Amino acid sequence: MRTEKQVYDTILNFAKADERIRAVTLEGSRTNVNILPDDFQDYDVTFFVTDMASFTAADDWLAVFGERLIMQKPEDMALFPAEEPGYSYLMLFADDVKMDLTLLPVADIDAYFTWDKLVELLLDKDGRVRNPPVPTDGDYHLQCPTARMFDDCCNEFWNTTTYVVKGLCRGEILFAIDHLNEIVRKELIRMIGWTVGFERGFDFSVGKNAKFLKAYISADWWQRLMATYRTDSYAHAWTALEQCLALFREVSATVARRLDCPYPPYDANISAYVARQKAKYGVRAD
């Protein structure tokens, strides 16, 4: 694997030599002093260019960055259309270096610095950026909830629980698992994150997809959270759901106390509904 210096030299030497590239920025974890570096960190780089079409017309210019194992161009895909502005090349190279390179028009540079604060200016040929920002992950810090946010989280969790139950009772396990994974557990993790904030402050991040959450919660909570991921049968999916409900009940009661707000009635109503449907339909065989 190339060293960090070798990668940056390749990027910046190419940018300096090409008149179409007027500025270069770095985004993501490599700008975040709170993230321990490792070999899997992407190089998230943006080129601000004068002529987008001359770059996107062909891909041969990308060879300078190395031999690619695979590349994805989100803006050139029909099944997975891009959601971000610009034109991107997501590249994994033969030496295991990963680079996500985005092209943006030079005219977007001022707006760009309002999109994300976790950014570092690497090159500015024209002195367009008069006050280069200091990278900060402040936009990703835990957010202290309001009573309304707390209620919304509880409502979403318990309301979507009924969809998981419906899928399990109907024999539609993929439907059930999808709602458990995509909504129910995400609200559980959100609620757990709030407890971390109340204990440790709301001035830091638990990482993308809560990847650092384990470091901030008890071993008991972590083991119980992990137990909600086994859903490879109807019996296991029911157990995972019930584990989610029990843990959410405990965690949300803690947040309610910290906010000094009432614990909503969704728990009692929907827990009774879950028990009633499970008793009525039973647990399907695999």
Image (spheres, rainbow, N blue to C red):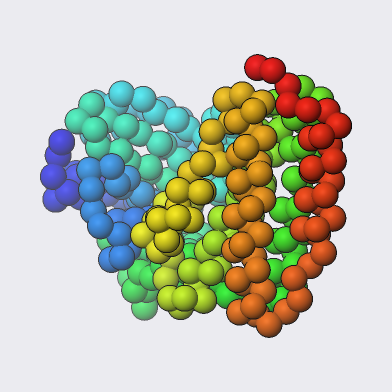
The residue that appears at 64% across and 28% down in the rendered structure is 235
Task: State the quadrant of the N terminus.
Answer: top left
The residue drawn where x is 83% and y is 28% is 281
Q: Is residue 180 above or below residue 168?
A: below
Q: In this rendering, does residue 129 appear at all?
A: no
The picture quadrant where one finds residue 59 is: top left
Q: Quadrant of residue 189?
A: bottom right
- What is the x, y in percent for residue 118? 40, 64
Residue 133: quarter of image: bottom left
Front position in the image: 218 or 85? 218
Q: Could you tell me which quadrant the C terminus lies in? A: top right
Give the x, y percent position of residue 12.
22, 51
Decide if residue 179 is on the left or right side of residue 8: right
Q: Is residue 150 above or below residue 187?
A: below
In the rendered view, tell whether residue 168 sits above or below residue 141: above
Who's the residue at 70% across and 61% down the image?
153
The total of numbered circles placed on residues is 0
Q: Residue furthest top?
A: 286
Considering depth in this image, is 204 or 130 the residue closer to the camera? 204
Q: Residue at x 53, y 69 (%)?
A: 195
Residue that protrudes farthest toward the bottom in the picture = 260
Q: Decide which of 177, 230 is in the foreground and name it.
A: 230
Q: Is residue 46 visible?
A: yes
Instruction: From the top left corner, tell me how far across and down residue 78 is, in percent.
Output: 62, 27
Q: Is residue 264 left or right of residue 40?
A: right
In the displayed structure, 47 sits above or below 94; it is: below
